[in-house]
Image (cartoon, rainbow, N blue to C red):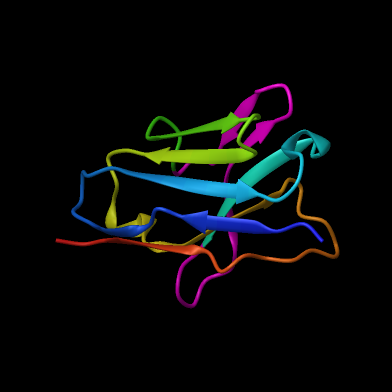
Amino acid sequence: QVQFVESGGGLVQPGGSLRLSCAVSGNINRFVAIGWYRQAPGKQLEWVAVISRGGSTNFADSVKGRFTISRDNFSDAVYLQMNRLKPEDTAAYYCNEYPIPEVTTWGQGTQVTVSS
């Protein structure tokens, strides 16, 4: 069973930065792409960013230009560098396959709170 373990969240002031980590069990290269997703209280799950096996990236318009995504195939990890954070970035962040399979297991996520 695939496991995704997210870490790196925290409380940060507007304009600050955080780097999230996603540890993937097994060989990360078996996935065509890995995505970051987030869910704010009372809102639906939202896709944030994706990185393909080959390293191609794409971002939601709301984070484009502020977030970057990278991967370390040797460590089976994916990272989300978040800069110029805004209060509306506050959410629980998750990583998973992209696109999300019909049957999947979600990690516990990591909470990001942007507040002064």
Q: Which of 25 and 39 is in front in this view?
A: 25
- Whole-percent x, y for residue 36 in the image: 58, 48
Q: Which of 32 and 46 is in front in this view?
A: 32
Residue at 68% across / 53% down in the picture?
96
Q: In this view, does 11 lie to the left or right of 45?
A: left
Location of residue 30 (image quadrant): top right
What quarter of the picture does the N terminus occupy? bottom right
| Residues rendered magenta in the picture | 39-62
Q: In this view, does 7 lie to the left or right of 52?
A: left
- Whole-percent x, y for residue 64 in the image: 45, 34
Q: Is residue 105 magenta?
A: no
Residue at 79% across / 63% down in the picture?
104
Location of residue 102 with respect to 56 vertically, above or below: below
- Whole-percent x, y for residue 105 in the image: 74, 66
What quarter of the picture does the C terminus occupy? bottom left
Residue extending furthest left?
A: 116
Location of residue 59 with respect to 103 vertically, above or below: above
Q: Is residue 55 magenta?
A: yes
Residue at 29% across / 51% down in the picture?
86
